Amino acid sequence: MLRQVLLSASRSTKVKNLVETAPVTSALVRRFVAGDHAFDAVRATEHLAAQGLYATVDHLGEDTLDPAHAEAACVACLMLLSRLRDAGLARNAEVSVKLSALGGALPGGAALALRHARNICAAAEKAGTTVTLDMEDHTTTDATLETLRALRADYPWVGAVLQASLRRTEADCRDLAGEGSRVRLCKGAYRAPGFAAFTTRADVDLSYVRCLKILMAGAGYPMVATHDPRLVELAGMLAARNRRAPGSYEYQMLYGVRPAEQARLAARGERVRIYVPYGDQWYGYLVRRLAERPANLAFFLRSVAGR
Ligand code: FAD
C-alpha cells in the first residue's frame, strides 16, 4: 500500500515541488546519488574502480516533454562519455539511458529518442564502452525493445533491462537470451496494473527465478540486478550449473545500496557493476528507492522533520 502511494508520488508534480522545496535531507540524496555534475559521477566511478567494482552511469532525468531538454540530456551523456574516456575509465564504466529522457515520451518521440540514442551509442563505441537502455513503466516496454532492436543492428552490444514484475518478461527473456545479447534482469520499480504485472512480492520473486534460469542457460550475457540475498545466491548456483565462469555474467547493484555485499562479491572474483546516478533531476529516482524500503522512508521523514 505504502509502496503504491510512493510510486504514484514519484510521478506527481505537486509532491515533487513539495519535496524539492522542503528542507529535505541532502544526506539521503547523497546516499543514492553521486552528485550534481559529471565530475561527481567520474569521481564515484574512480572510487568504485579502486575497489574492483564496475559502473553504469546514469545522467538523471525522465519523462521529458520538451525537445530542447531531450537534446540537453543527449549532450550531457556525450559529455559524460568523453569525461569517462579522458579519465581512463571507459573499460570500467558504461552508461545507462532512459529513452523518456531523450524525448521518447513526446508525441511521436520514439524517432527523436532513437536518433539521440544512436548518437550516444556512436560516442560509446568510440570511447570503447557500452550502453544499456533502462526500462521504464510497462506502457513503454514495446517501444524500448523496438528501439533496442534498431540500435543493435548497428551496435550489437547495446543492452536492455527486463522487469520480472511484468507477466510478459519470461517470453521477452526467451527472445533476448541469444548470443551477444546483454540483458539486465531486475524486479521492476514501477507501478503497473494486474493485467500487466504480478501483484505480490512472492510472484515477482518467482518470476525473477524463472527469468534468471532462462538467461543463465542462454548464450547471452546476463546482468543480475538485485540486492535480494536469495536471488544473488541463486544466480551463483545457476552460473555454476550452466558452467559460466565469472565475467560471462555480472551482478549489478545500486549506488548506496548494500555496499558491503558489493565488495564481498567482488572479493570472491565476481564482476559487480554499480548503477551510479548523478544530476539534479533526482526526485523520481529517489522516491522509487524510498518505495523499495520503508526504512529509507523513515530516515527521510526524520530528516525532513529536522531530527
Ligand atoms: P528487494 O526485494 O526490493 O530488496 C531486497 C533487499 O535489498 C532488501 O531487503 C534490502 O535489504 C535491499 N534493498 C533493496 N532496495 C533497497 C533500497 N532502495 N535501499 C536500501 N536497501 C535496499 N528498475 C526498473 O524498473 N528499471 C530499470 O531500468 C532498473 N534498473 C536497475 C539497475 C540496477 C543496477 C539495479 C540494481 C536495479 C534497477 N532497477 C530498475 C530497480 C529494480 O527494479 C528494483 O526496484 C530494486 O533493485 C529493488 O529490488 P531488489 O531486487 O533489490 O529486491
Image: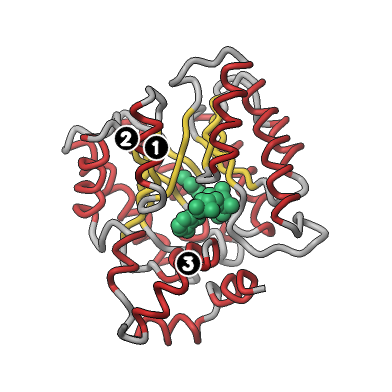
Circle 3 residue: 295
- Tell whether circle 3 marks a residue whose Cβ is less than 8 angstroms from ligand 1: yes
Q: Which residue is at 34% across, 68% downward? A: 28
Q: Mark 1 packing: few (<14 Cα in 10 Å), some, or many (20+)?
A: many
The disc labelled 2 sits on which kind of residue?
Answer: Leu
Q: Position of residue 96 (x, y in %)?
A: 43, 46
Q: Which residue is mark 1?
A: 273
Decide which of 142, 33 is in the foreground and name it: 33
Tell me the kind of residue under disc 1.
Arg
User: The disc labelled 3 sits on which kind of residue?
Assistant: Ala
How many residues crowd mark 3 within 10 Å: few (<14), some (14–19), many (20+)? Answer: few
Question: What residue is at 38 percent from the left and 67 percent from the top?
Answer: 282
Question: Residue 262's quadrant in the figure?
Answer: top left
Q: For the C terminus, which image quadrant?
A: bottom left
Q: Is residue 219 above or below residue 256?
A: above
- Marks 1 and 3 sit apart, C-alpha to C-alpha, by 24 Å
